[in-house]
Amino acid sequence: MTVVVGKNGVGKSSLFDAFGFLADCLKFGVDEACHRNGRGGFERLRSGGSDNNIEFEIYYRESSNERPITYELSIGTDRHGRPIAGDSDRDGEAKKTGWPFSFLELNNGSGKEAKHAF
């Protein structure tokens, strides 16, 4: 069980919406996810009028005996101003050796998968 506690206005709902946004990106695509649930589009999601990408990093380990997975997602705009995502997954060897191994990469709407035995 996870409990999130804090004062009003410190970002509890934003934290949960970030997970909802990631789910919407996978289900509906990045452009539609930016507009769902009153988010107001990609430019509104950027912080303080910034022109930087929106970036997420999720570090996950099923159990202490399993290798961890890091999922990174960066959302920017294409040359037409439409939101576009790039992502990658890395296995736990990155944390052990300092050398990340990407086994899934997506950039500008196309991707590749590396062959890797777990």
Image: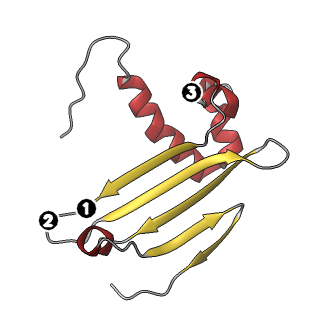
SS label for mark 1: loop
Q: Is residue 91 left or right of residue 55?
A: left
The location of residue 34, given as percent across then percent down, is 65, 36
- Mark 3 vs mark 1, foreground winner is 3
Q: Amino acid at mark 2?
A: Ser
Residue 12 x %, y %: 35, 24
Percent of width and height locating residue 108: 71, 60
Quarter assignment of residue 10: top left
Is 29 located above or below residue 116 in the figure?
above
Q: From the viewer's perspective, is residue 105 above or below residue 60?
A: below
| Apparent side of residue 110 relative to residue 18 in the rendered image (left or right) | right
Q: Report x, y in % for residue 9.
A: 38, 13
Q: Residue 64 shows which numbered tag?
A: 2
User: How crowded is the residue under tag 2: few (<14 C-alpha within 10 Å), some, or many (20+)?
Assistant: few
Figure label count? 3
- Report if the CB atoms under discs 1 and 2 are less than 8 Å apart: yes
Q: Which residue is mark 3?
A: 47
49 vs 77, left or right, is left
- Please, what secondary structure does the residue beneath circle 3 have? helix
Residue highlighted by disc 1: 61
> Which of the two residues, 62 or 107, is positioned nearer the viewer here?
107
Residue 41 shows up from this direction: no
Q: Secondary structure at mark 2?
A: loop
Q: Is residue 11 visible?
A: yes
